[in-house]
Amino acid sequence: MSKESTYIWKLGMFVALGLLLFIATIYFIGKQQNLFGDTFEMESKFKNVSGLEVGNNVRFSGINVGTIEEIHLVNDSTVVVKMVIEGEVQKFIKSDAKATIGSEGLMGDKVLTIIPGTHSNKIIENGATITSIEAIEMDDLMKSVKKSVDNAGVITTELATFSHNMNHGDGALSKLVTDKKVATSLEKTMKNIQSASKGLDENMEAAKENFLLRGYFRRKEKEAKEDSIQKAKAMKEDLPKEEKKNKK
């Protein structure tokens, strides 16, 4: 084989491989961008798209079913996001579906997720607009975490201060908890109170048996019984009055 024939053969192989690579690239890009096959469009409105870009994936039930076709501002508080979705999943997306923006991992590309509808049996139509759910911004999340950490730090400091004051303070509560003498004294005082109370009960019982005071206690018991009888009569007299009021 001459050098010229070898050169032409190598050139032809190179062109053929390049052409195959070009076709494969076009195919994969077209498939990624839904250029081939049946598709339909839908859109959603957001206040903030959180860095979402044209070409990012659209997911439904965790599966990539489309891509972002267009993003444009309507006014200072509304951003319209248009999507191209594979036609075969249209029957699964209901008219009350919702859209939200998330990330592929903590720092990955943004992705728009379609949340399936639950209350409607109507299938989404081509060009329809679905409700959006605003995603939590990472800055807001970090602010919330920082606030929680700061609050935890304040609580820890206050607990440490309280513990130190309890262990080394001169206050009554500190002495009550840490001073054994105070605790022993308090225990003795409580026992003395219980003993005195028991003795008082015994003295009262003895006084009732004393013939000089027996009449006094009997008179008190009689007065208590009469008072109970009077209260019972008053309640019986008031009962018919209450029934008449309720009937009126």
Image: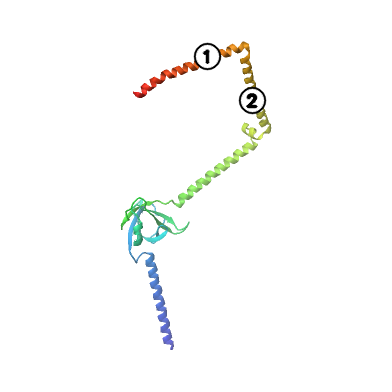
Give left or right: position of 204 versus 23: right
Q: What colour scheme has been applied to the protein in the rendered image?
A: rainbow
Q: Which amino acid, mark 1?
A: Glu
* Residue 56 visible (yes or no): no
Rendering coords of residue 149 (x, y %)? 53, 46
Task: Describe the element under mark 2 as helix, strand or loop.
Answer: helix
User: Residue at (49%, 17%) from the top-left corner?
Assistant: 228
As displayed, is residue 176 above or below residue 248? below
Q: Which amino acid, mark 2?
A: Gln
Q: In the rendered structure, are the residues bearing label 2 and label 1 in contact, judged by CB atoms less than 8 Å apart?
A: no
The disc placed on residue 194 is 2
Q: 205 or 5, which lies in front?
A: 205
Q: 115 or 205, which lies in front?
A: 205
Judge depth for marks 2 and 1 and give the one in front. Answer: 1
Task: Describe the element under mark 1 as helix, strand or loop.
Answer: helix
Q: 135 or 241, which lies in front?
A: 241
Q: 197 or 133, which lies in front?
A: 197
Rendering coords of residue 131 (x, y %)? 35, 52
Q: Earlier in the sequence, mark 2 or mark 1?
A: 2
> Which corner quadrant of the image does residue 217 belong to?
top right
* Residue 44 visible (yes or no): yes
As displayed, is residue 79 above or below residue 234? below
User: Residue at the bottom extreme?
Assistant: 2
Gap in angstroms between the C-alphas marked 2 and 1:
30 Å
The disc placed on residue 223 is 1
The quadrant of the image that shows the C terminus is top left
**Label 1, residues with CA under 10 Å away: few <14, some 14-19, many ≥20:** few
User: Residue at (39%, 67%) from the top-left corner?
Assistant: 29
User: Residue at the right extreme?
Assistant: 181
Give left or right: position of 208 versus 1: right
> Which corner quadrant of the image does residue 168 belong to?
top right
